[in-house]
Amino acid sequence: PTPADIQVLRGHQLPLTCLVVSSDSKHVYTGAKDCSIIKWNIAEGKKEKVVAGGRKGTEDKHQGHTAHVLCLAISSDNKFLASGCRNKIIHIWDPVSLTRLHTFTGHRDAVAGLAFRKGTHTLFSGSHDKTVKVWSLDEMAYVETLFGHEDSIMALDSLARERAVTAGGRDRTVRVWKIPEESQLVFHGENRGSIDCVAFINEQHIVSGDDNGNVCVWGLMKKKPLVSVRGAHHAEGSEQQECWVSAVAALTNSDLIASGGNSSGA
């Protein structure tokens, strides 16, 4: 894209932490450290709805979050929007009106990752309490809790199969949770860094990033990375500078992967 093609949307009072795009690419939803959620019209580049952040201690009265919003997810039919925060809470919203439909509690620490199973209303959540929880939004009910990580879960993703993938931070593992089989595949990072982000490329391949600046591609049939790019975000002349990878994404079923970090490039 040329500079003229790039839109800058401003509205949050504090740094953004997460965003999600509707499946029809008409709207983007953003969450931030100011505890707010904003719905944007992509074509017009304007806000459509805002759920303002509230003050700590007003949870019983306030519709939105009262702590940093850390993650967002939207169902593939655009029927449900989910948001998670540092206050251990998951809110479920109507994406059209941003009316709150339900609140899930149960995690014992910050909710750091959310993902819908594609084509369903099954929601996976990952938390700093080291667990993954499964929720049914058709029933607005808790389903089960998955245990295995030895440190905070930092990120989570899911595609169409009944599986989720998680990044376990300082336990230095990526785990694929096979829900029907009640089992998990464990992949150990090659370095001592924290694995902070993860995404499915397709149902058989995963990409992860860590705070040592490494990007790795994994296949479910091998315990070691298929490809590792070390120091992916190290700029020339700044070898001593920490350049951690804080976000990864993949165009599903393609060979296109993107990563973001604290360096100036992507």
Image: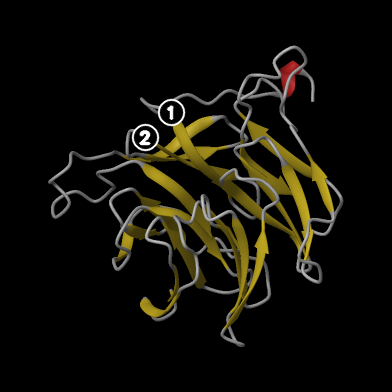
**Residue 244 sits in which quadrant?**
top right
Query: Residue 84's x, y, as percent?
Result: 39, 53
At x 32%, y 39%, the residue is 35
Locate the N terminus by quadrant. Answer: top right
At x 28%, y 66%, the residue is 105
The reply, left or right, for residue 190 in relation to residue 103 is: right
Q: Which residue is mark 2?
A: 33
> In the picture shown, does residue 181 fall above or below 31?
below
Amino acid type for the residue under numbered disc 2: Lys
Decide: marks 1, 2 in contact (CB < 8 A)?
Answer: yes
At x 17%, y 42%, the residue is 56
At x 79%, y 68%, the residue is 204
**Residue 120 sits in which quadrant?**
bottom right
**Residue 257 sits in which quadrant?**
top right
The reply, left or right, for residue 99 in relation to residue 40 is: left
For the residue carrying disc 2, how many other residues have a C-alpha within 10 Å: few (<14), some (14-19), or many (20+)? many
Q: CA distance from mark 1 to mark 2?
A: 6 Å
Q: Secondary structure at mark 2?
A: loop
Q: Residue furthest top?
A: 237
Q: Residue furthest bottom?
A: 181
For the residue carrying disc 1, how many other residues have a C-alpha within 10 Å: few (<14), some (14-19), or many (20+)? few
Q: Which residue is mark 1?
A: 15
Question: Residue 73 versus residue 134: which sits nearer the camera?
Answer: 134
Locate the C terminus by quadrant. Answer: top right
The reply, left or right, for residue 190 in relation to residue 69 is: right
> In the picture shown, does residue 101 fall above or below 20?
below
The reply, left or right, for residue 31 in relation to residue 100 is: right
Query: Residue 174's x, y, as percent?
Result: 62, 60
| Mark 1 vs 2, N-terminal side | 1
